[in-house]
């Protein structure tokens, strides 16, 4: 194993923040991973680097999870079980599934990051979440090197949440994920966002999973910046869920406030709308700022530090709290 020293992590995080790793190892096999864990328990796991913000150097061994491979492990008449190694790029994995006619992930096209981190925050978009097609995953316990299989129920999936963000945070390394996808009679979800309207605009009345994927890709490209062109981590905040009474009071004051019903007692409000109402959309503060097309996305214009980006996030939280009495929760993992 080739453990490198004093490596810049700028190429390994989509925010493009330049911090230093005192030690760095590119992990390409399970055997190497288990071997290094026998000697090092105090490690930092780095996958696609798409859902984190570095605010300081990492003074420990950084394990860059680079496990590759996609395979069909089981089939029935209706379903196919597809296993992906943790280091596979998420979007490329989704496209692979679509090209093979496997449905269920098309709404999650173009989400940055790798497959291994997708269950951690139960990634979701346009009415679909990982938990909808998740079957099980394999992981290695950091302190013991033991392998463990997690089934769906054990993952405790919630809105942008899982057991791996709570009681098991930092205790396991996900090495592979298995999804249960449809082979035929695909159940398309086109009601969320502008998917159906865009399909109608294109004259597509019998959409395929590829049609839905293409529309999602175009919508995301029109609204969200490409991390390869401008540093960002996608949605920085979770959409808050508030009590119905609180929402009614806000509705009286802000009649145009958008919302999504969660239950008889709760309403989800778009964080981007709240941030925009506070005047942050498109604002720049030195080397960092808020994207001009999507207030939910914080960006690095080139040389911003993680601390600069985080300060903007805190300012946004304070402003939204003061104006709407809503506490915004950061979705990105701040290190």
Image (cartoon, rainbow, N blue to C red):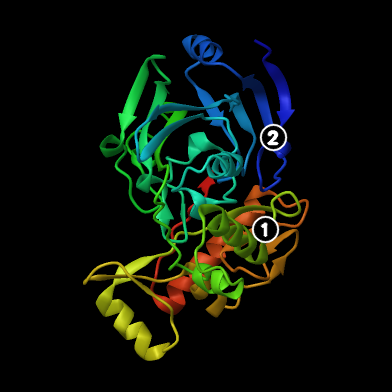
How many C-alpha atoms fall within 10 Å of the one at disc 1: few (<14), some, or many (≥20)? many
Say whether disc 1 or disc 2 marks the residue closer to the N-terminus: 2
Q: Is residue 183 left or right of residue 194?
A: left
Q: Nearer the viewer, residue 154 or 24?
A: 154
Residue 254 image offset from top left, x and y in percent: 43, 87
How many C-alpha atoms fall within 10 Å of the one at disc 2: few (<14), some, or many (≥20)? many
Q: Residue pushed farthest left?
A: 264
Q: Which mark is residue 1?
A: none
Cα separation between marks 1 and 2: 17 Å
Query: Is there any visible trace of residue 92 in the rendered image?
Result: yes
Point out the image quarter for the N terminus.
top right
Above or below residue 263? Residue 332 is above
Q: Quadrant of residue 174?
A: top left
Above or below residue 64? Residue 296 is below
Point out the image quarter for the C terminus.
top right
The answer to whether the residue labelled 1 contacts the one labelled 2, judged by CB atoms less than 8 Å apart, is: no
Residue 218 image offset from top left, x and y in percent: 64, 62
The structure residue drawn at horizontal position 47% and vertical position 61%, both measured from the top left corner, is 126
Please name the residue that numbered disc 1 is placed on: 299
The structure residue drawn at horizontal position 60% and vertical position 19%, both measured from the top left corner, is 28
Please name the residue that numbered disc 2 is placed on: 9
Secondary structure under tag 1 reads strand
Q: Nearer the viewer, residue 266 or 190?
A: 190
Q: Quadrant of residue 157?
A: top left
Above or below residue 219? Residue 157 is above
Secondary structure under tag 2 reads loop
Residue 263 image offset from top left, x and y in percent: 24, 68
The structure residue drawn at horizontal position 67% and vertical position 48%, both measured from the top left corner, is 15
Query: Is there any visible trace of residue 335 in the rendered image?
Result: no
Q: Quadrant of residue 52?
A: top right
Residue 260 image offset from top left, x and y in percent: 37, 72
């Amino acid at each position: 194993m080739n453990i490198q020293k004093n490596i810049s992590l700028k190429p390994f995080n989509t925010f493009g923040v330049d911090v230093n790793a005192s030690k760095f190892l590119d992990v390409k096999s399970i055997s190497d991973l288990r071997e290094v864990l026998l000697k090092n328990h105090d490690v930092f796991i780095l996958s696609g680097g798409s859902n984190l913000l570095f605010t300081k150097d990492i003074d420990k061994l950084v394990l860059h999870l680079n496990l590759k491979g996609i395979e069909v492990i089981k089939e029935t008449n209706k379903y196919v079980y597809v296993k992906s190694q943790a280091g596979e790029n998420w979007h490329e994995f989704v496209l692979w599934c679509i090209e093979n006619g496997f449905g269920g992930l098309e709404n999650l096209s173009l989400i940055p990051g790798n497959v291994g981190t997708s269950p951690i925050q139960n990634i979701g978009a346009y009415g679909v979440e990982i938990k909808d097609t998740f079957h099980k995953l394999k992981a290695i316990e950091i302190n013991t090197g033991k392998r463990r299989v997690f089934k769906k129920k054990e993952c405790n999936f919630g809105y942008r949440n899982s057991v791996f963000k709570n009681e098991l945070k930092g205790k396991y390394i996900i090495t592979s994920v298995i999804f249960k996808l449809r082979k035929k009679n695909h159940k398309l979800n086109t009601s969320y966002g502008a998917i159906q309207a865009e399909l109608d605009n294109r004259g597509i009345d019998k959409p395929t999973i590829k049609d839905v994927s293409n529309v999602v890709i175009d919508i995301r490209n029109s609204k969200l910046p490409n991390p390869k062109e401008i540093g960002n981590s996608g949605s920085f905040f979770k959409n808050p869920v508030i009590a119905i009474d609180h929402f009614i009071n806000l509705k009286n004051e802000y009649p145009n406030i958008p919302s999504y019903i969660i239950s008889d007692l709760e309403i989800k409000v778009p964080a981007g709308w709240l941030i925009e109402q506070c005047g942050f959309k498109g604002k720049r503060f030195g080397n960092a700022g808020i994207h001009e097309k999507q207030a939910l996305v914080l960006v690095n214009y080139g040389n911003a530090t993680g601390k600069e980006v985080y300060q903007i996030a805190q300012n946004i939280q304070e402003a939204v709290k003061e104006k709407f009495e809503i506490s915004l929760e950061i979705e990105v993992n701040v290190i």
